[in-house]
Image: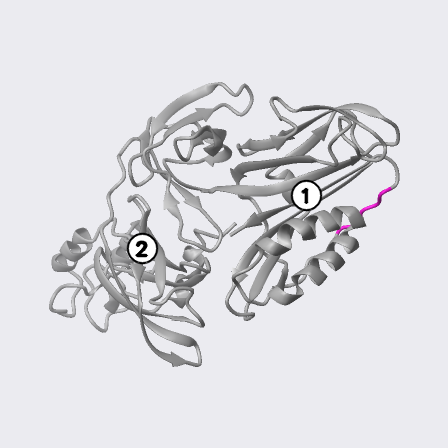
């Protein structure tokens, strides 16, 4: 998942950077530490041992730390910087981080090798202590190419709202790989006890994903909500609540296309098979009918209920896929790649042929494809596959696939897990498309 809130670790790289004259320790806020620094310089003049020129903040500077400087400190008391994290829409990566002294208009430059859109599109998270985090969308203007990439002029207006005193405040965001994030807007949220799953409290987010409720004891909870008006958009997310403010980011719903589940018991077996969605989700279509699970009879050859070669389903669930390792493959090499990769993973000829027959005609329109494999452990975070009689060997592989215009994306190759096919074996393949 994208690191939404890494901006706080990046601000030292920020350009431009403003400072508040009363932030003597350059911490990004005016607080008790600044007051202590000021107190040590109190009543001093230039040349005296306790003189500190940083504390001479009266306008104009007058070479003495006195009540005029106290007034300047008071005017800025509890001030905090605004931190901006800038992300590329279409690639999803953070392209810059900067700070603002206060709300209002900011003009800045970012550099990007090859923006996904033309003109370039971006989104930004704005953070400030004591205020709700906000999400902004904006378009940049390409100026010229440099050794750092395209120089892109950006403009943004920042206007933040203070949190509600005495309440537990927060914002809920929905994230997606590559493209712009969004608020969980206008949604009912149940807060559940992690031990009993009883509802502790409920709240409704506004159009900017914000909420303000009575404080809760610090600890682990679950949030239960729908990100849209359909049952298929259900979320069940674990959260940690600490203090009186929290930003929460959850992956948005994604469709898994045409997973095929091949089952090979050692003898004809009656089985119950079901799909479990740990973060929420549901089956949207299935053959044979899914209902509360599949109740099937399977022969050693893999024939199910005397007529099916495999179980088929499609589902929606929060997308907890990994996008760290993978391959970039030219369109003309896709069939060779999938045949080789699936065989190396442990799939047999008939399963591979089914994949090729269905997917190769559907992967068109781009010269290159980024392919991110989701193996057993990755998939268990999204869709667990459970049987009344557990198989001795379970091979699961769902490819997350995204079309690319160039092959400039560099990905470290995954380590392909070792699978065996001796004894009761289940194999599953499928695809997530972007």
Residue 145: image quadrant is bottom left
Q: Is residue 204 above or below residue 20?
A: above
Q: Main secondary structure of the magenta part?
A: loop
Which residue is the site of mark 2?
A: 137
- Identify the element where label 2 is drawn: strand
> Left of 71 or right of it: where is 277?
right
Residue 44 in picture, x, y percent from top left:
20, 64
- Identify the element where label 1 is drawn: helix
Q: Nearer the viewer, residue 131 or 52?
A: 131
User: Which residue is depicted at the point 40% across and 58% down?
Assistant: 89
Q: Which mark is residue 167?
A: none
Q: Is residue 187 above or below residue 181?
A: above
Residue placed furthest toward the front: 307
Magenta span? 417-421
> Left of 208 or right of it: where is 73?
left
Taking the magenta stretch, the answer to whether it contains residue 420 is yes
Give neighbour class at mark 1: few <14, some 14-19, many 20+ (Cα, 10 Å). Answer: few
Residue 295 in picture, x, y percent from top left:
71, 22
Give neighbour class at mark 2: few <14, some 14-19, many 20+ (Cα, 10 Å). Answer: some
- Let me know if residue 28 appears in the view: no
User: Which residue is depicted at the point 29% across and 35% down?
Assistant: 206
Q: Is residue 236 above or below residue 180?
A: above
Q: Is residue 381 above or below residue 33?
A: above
Which residue is the site of mark 1?
A: 377
């Amino acid at each position: 998942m994208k690191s939404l809130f890494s901006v706080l670790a990046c601000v030292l790289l920020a350009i431009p950077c403003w400072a508040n004259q009363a932030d003597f320790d350059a911490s990004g806020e005016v607080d008790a530490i600044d007051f202590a620094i000021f107190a040590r310089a109190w009543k001093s003049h230039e040349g005296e041992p306790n003189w500190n020129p940083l504390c001479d903040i009266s306008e104009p500077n007058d070479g003495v730390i006195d009540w005029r400087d106290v007034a300047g400190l008071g005017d800025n008391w509890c001030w905090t910087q605004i931190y901006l994290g800038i992300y590329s829409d279409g690639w999803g990566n953070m392209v810059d981080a900067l700070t603002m002294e206060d709300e209002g208009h900011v003009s800045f430059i970012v550099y990007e090798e090859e923006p996904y859109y033309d003109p370039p599109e971006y989104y930004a998270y704005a953070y400030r202590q004591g205020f709700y985090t906000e999400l902004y969308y904006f378009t940049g203007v390409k100026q010229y190419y440099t050794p750092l990439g395209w120089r892109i002029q950006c403009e943004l207006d920042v206007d933040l709202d203070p949190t509600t005193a005495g309440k537990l405040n927060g914002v809920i965001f929905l994230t997606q790989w590559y493209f712009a994030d969004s608020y969980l807007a206008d949604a009912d949220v149940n807060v559940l006890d992690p031990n009993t799953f009883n509802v502790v409290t409920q709240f409704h987010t506004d159009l900017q994903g914000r909420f303000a409720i009575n404080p809760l004891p610090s600890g682990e909870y679950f949030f239960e909500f729908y990100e849209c008006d359909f049952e298929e958009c259900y979320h069940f997310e674990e959260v940690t609540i600490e203090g009186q403010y929290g930003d929460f980011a959850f992956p948005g719903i994604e469709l898994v296309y045409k997973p095929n589940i091949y089952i090979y018991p050692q003898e004809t077996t009656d089985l119950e098979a079901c799909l479990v969605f740990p973060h929420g989700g549901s089956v949207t279509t299935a053959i044979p009918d899914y209902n509360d699970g599949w109740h099937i009879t399977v022969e050693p050859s893999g024939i199910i209920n005397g007529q099916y070669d495999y179980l088929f389903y499609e589902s929606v669930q929060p997308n907890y896929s990994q996008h760290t390792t993978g391959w970039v493959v030219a369109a003309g090499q896709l069939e060779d790649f999938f045949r080789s990769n699936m065989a190396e993973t442990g799939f047999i000829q008939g399963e591979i042929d089914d994949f090729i027959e269905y997917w190769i005609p559907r992967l068109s329109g781009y010269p290159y494809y980024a392919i991110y494999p989701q193996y057993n452990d990755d998939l268990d975070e999204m869709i667990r596959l459970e049987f009344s009689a557990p198989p001795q060997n379970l091979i699961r592989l769902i490819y997350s696939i995204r079309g690319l215009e160039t092959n400039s994306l560099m990905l470290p190759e995954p380590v392909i897990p070792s699978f065996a096919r001796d004894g009761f074996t289940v194999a599953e393949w499928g695809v997530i498309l972007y």
